[in-house]
Image (spheres, grey):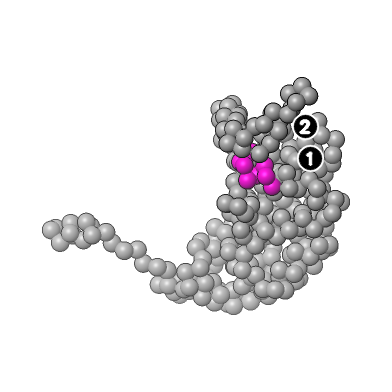
Amino acid sequence: MSWEYFDEYPRYESVAKRREKAEKLAKKIAAKQGPLQPAVSKGQKIATSFWGQAWNRNLERYAEYEHRLPRGRTYVKNGLVIDLKVERGAILALVSGSEVYEVRINIKPLGVGRWKSLKKACSGQIASLVGLLQGKLPTSVMEAVTDEHEGLFPEPREIQFICSCPDYADLCKHSAAAVYGVGARLDDQPELLFLLRGVDHTELIANAGDTVAAQAVALDAIADGELGDLSGLFGIELDMGEELAAAVEELKPKKKKRAGAKKAAKKA
């Protein structure tokens, strides 16, 4: 529910109307600029994964943001973040309001010393990195990456909000919507957090310790049906060797043949 102002009197505009308006604007912009990447929340929760929820909790623990964040949550839930892109050191978004506003949020890169400390904290814990796909991390790794001052998530002093709207506040509702949109996006692409902070997540894997132990964890995870393509997740090739690769294939769920295919085979 929202109010748009015309002269001195408020004019009510329903959520459905605002969503419809946002969809039309998105189609118009996409026709000129190419496909957009809207930030989509899942039901009542903006984020459901460990990474998405941790991002949102990090924002919500800072008092200077608490009065503006609720409007941003509403914007995301109503589908008003019509485009969201995450790149090294920046979040770029288009947010539909009384018009389409351009948002840019600059995030300082993670300090070299801080990154080294995180790599050390994750060293030898490859199980937590494989579990990144589902956000299943040991307590020690969770504490390291979510630490308020030494973790992966940015502090207010590392964030700069820029929006084309006339709001004079440092964090306007459109910027708040964009940062919450990142939480939703991290549900599906947790690696974007590392990209945003300017660090290479494969360095954590390289520092994960014993390769044999890592492979054993991978086998267990595949056997339990918890993981899909590990190489795709981390963007690297896992050199498992012929015997281990054969074991992985053996553990993967077998595809059932279609009944029609069986009948055709019998006739032949």
**Residue at 73% over, 23% down:** 6
Q: Is residue 260 visible?
A: yes
Q: In which quarter of the image is the N terminus?
A: top right
- Dot 2 falls on a residue whose secondary structure is loop
Q: Does 157 lie within the magenta span?
A: no
- Dot 1 falls on a residue whose secondary structure is loop
Query: Which residue lies under the disc numbered 2?
Result: 165
Image location (x, y in percent) of residue 37: 60, 41
Instruction: Using residue 76 as the reference point, say whether residue 112 is left or right of it.
Output: right
**Residue at 76% over, 58% down:** 58
User: Measured along the vertical axis of the image, is residue 64 above or below residue 228?
Assistant: above
| Helix, strand or loop for the magenta stretch, by majority | helix
User: Measured along the vertical axis of the image, is residue 211 above or below residue 75?
Assistant: below
Which amino acid is tagged 1?
Cys
Query: Which residue lies under the disc numbered 1?
Result: 172
Instruction: Using residue 257 as the reference point, say whether residue 242 is left or right of it.
Output: right
Q: Is residue 34 visible?
A: no
Disc 2 packing (10 Å; few <14; some 14–19; many ≥20): some
Q: Does 74 lie within the magenta span?
A: yes
Instruction: Using residue 148 as the reference point, say whether residue 95 is left or right of it.
Output: left
Image location (x, y in percent) of residue 208: 67, 71
Are the residues tagged 1 and 2 within 8 Å (C-beta)? yes
- Distance (Cα) linking label 1 and label 2: 8 Å
The span picked out in magenta is 73-80
**Residue at 73% over, 29% down:** 10
Disc 1 packing (10 Å; few <14; some 14–19; many ≥20): many
